[in-house]
Amino acid sequence: MTVSSPESAPSESWRRWLLMPSAARLGAKAPRNPEVGWDQYWSEIKATGDGGDVLWDTSNPGEMEQYLPIALEHLDPGLPIVDVGCGNGRQARILAEHFPDVLGVDLSPQAVERAKTESAGVGNLRFLALDVIAPEAGARLVEAVGGEANVFVRGVFHVLPPKARLAMAVNLRQLLGTAGRLFLAETNYPGDSLGYLQHLGARRGWIPAPLQRAITRLPKPRHFGALDRENCMPADEWVVETDGLTSIYTIPLQHQHGSEVIPGYYAVMRPK
């Protein structure tokens, strides 16, 4: 057996430094305005699903299979549900099998148009382009669903800066009212951003195309765990019904088959 010397086998930290120039060059292309970036992103998407261009749009049912038992235990199945950050509507279509009225909401009109196309024929599902951070968004959502509603959020809070997280939480609290519940699931990778890229298959000289597209168009992802959730949903305003660790799935990046799995955090919340 041959044992590689330090000179012939770069350390993990050295591999990260080698990746840094490529990641920085791609990240510099991201628009300063998130609304512009998201709409550019969705306008460039040619295909969704496991062989497509959307990093998080895996057809693997495993992630939603984690969420549904928890959601159905805590969320009133008689209320409408709003899927915030619905993208092309994959999770919204699954939710439509369990709730009487589903509204998918996304910042990007391009995403909403794709969601409408991919969800054609689902009678209890509709979509709306809306900035959920905007001051009037809570009232608009209440009007759109006709009152209180449950909320499903998968992978939105972790790409928002702190003030935007708080603004979104305020609007969702208005929509929940007294009967609604919020189910959220967010990526919470424990390492730094370069380690996160490596976890998804990036290395010097090669970054998977769906990951490149996300870096060049979208806000930089951050951690989102229990402390981050408490910072935007303080205990004097919110009650945690349950929370814990989960796994967020992406499309296959390093191999042709099998989703990539990212450490994540979930919670079910209600207004106090």
Image (spheres, rainbow, N blue to C red):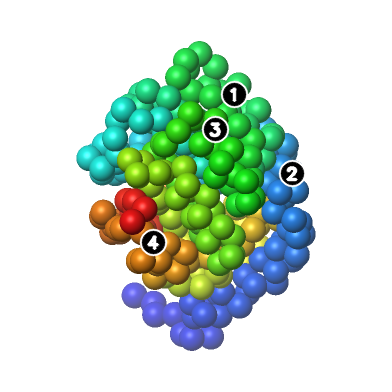
Q: Residues within 10 Å of mark 4 (few under 14, many from 20)?
A: few
| Residue 4 seen in render | yes
Q: Quadrant of the N terminus?
A: bottom left
Q: Is residue 230 left or right of residue 145?
A: left
Q: Amino acid at mark 1?
A: Lys
Q: Amino acid at mark 3?
A: Glu
Q: Find disc 2 in the rendering and name its residue.
A: 40
Q: Residues within 10 Å of mark 1 (few under 14, many from 20)?
A: some
**Where is residue 170 shown, x and y percent of the image?**
50, 55
Q: Amino acid at mark 4?
A: Glu
Q: Find disc 3 in the rendering and name its residue.
A: 143
Residue at image location 36% in from the left, 66% down from the top: 236
Q: Find disc 1 in the rendering and name its residue.
A: 116
Give the quarter of the image for residue 3. bottom left
| Residue 54 seen in render | no
Residue 260 disc label: none
Q: Find disc 4 in the rendering and name its residue.
A: 237
**Where is residue 156 shown, x and y percent of the image?**
52, 51
User: Up-down: is 260 above or below 202?
Assistant: above
Q: Secondary structure at mark 4?
A: loop
Residue at image location 72% in from the left, 61% down from the top: 26
**Which mark lies nearer to you, 2 or 4?**
4
Q: Residues within 10 Å of mark 3 (few under 14, many from 20)?
A: few
Q: Residues within 10 Å of mark 2 (few under 14, many from 20)?
A: some
